[in-house]
Amino acid sequence: MSNDTIAGSGLEKMFYGQILSILVIIPLVGWIAAIVGIVLFLVGLHEAAGADEGYRTAFYVEIGILVLSVLAVFIGVLNIVTSILRLVVIYLVCTTTAGLLEVKGDLGTAARGRFAWKFYGGCTALVVVCSILSLIPLVNVPASIASVVGGILLLIFLYRACKSLRY
């Protein structure tokens, strides 16, 4: 199996993991789907790590996020740290994938990946600022909207990238 095929297969699992994680908004069933989604995302990262070291680094950062998320239940400020680390994972996945896509010649999808992580970074900055300013009413609304858009851009990139790398 080529590195592109390995990365594409891992990205596909990450894509479906992200989709399942969105279902957390559904009571009870959503939490189960979200846990399955997190596991599937990790499995995808681990699988893609066979294609490039950037995915392996993202895998280790994601494990750190899980540990910090548990600790954030008791130490609230860690939520900001996990948001920043999540951006690191998105950066690593998008730039590593963009590099593979450029070698393959799919420059359009590679450019979308580079844009997706930058947009997601802007959303993360907005969320962090809004978390700090949470005492001001309605300040979280623009951050929520931007985060949804960033998540959609990321999903579209993951989908297109896995299809491009697998075929």
Image: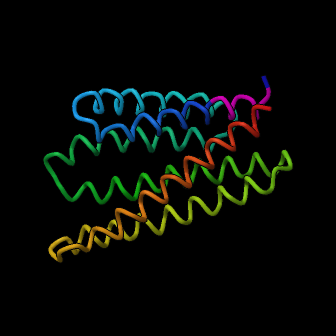
User: Where residue 60 sits in the image (x, y, percent)?
Assistant: 47, 39
On-image quarter of the N terminus: top right
Does 140 sit left or right of 95 as displayed?
left
Residue 32 versus residue 9: which sits nearer the camera?
32
The residue shown at (65%, 60%) is: 114
Quadrant of res 158: top right
Residue 32 against residue 135 in the figure, above or below = above
Quadrant of res 133: bottom left
Does 19 sit left or right of 82 as displayed?
right
The residue shown at (65%, 54%) is: 95
Residue 116 against residue 39 in the figure, above or below = below
Seen from this angle, which residue lies furthest right? 105
Which segment is the magenta one? 2-9
On-image quarter of the C terminus: top right
- Total number of numbered discs in the rendering: 0
User: Where residue 45 sits in the image (x, y, percent)?
Assistant: 55, 34
Does 129 sit left or right of 39 as displayed?
left
Seen from this angle, which residue lies furthest top? 1
| Dominant secondary-structure state across the stretch colored magenta | helix
Quadrant of res 67: top left
User: Where residue 13 sits in the image (x, y, percent)?
Assistant: 56, 30
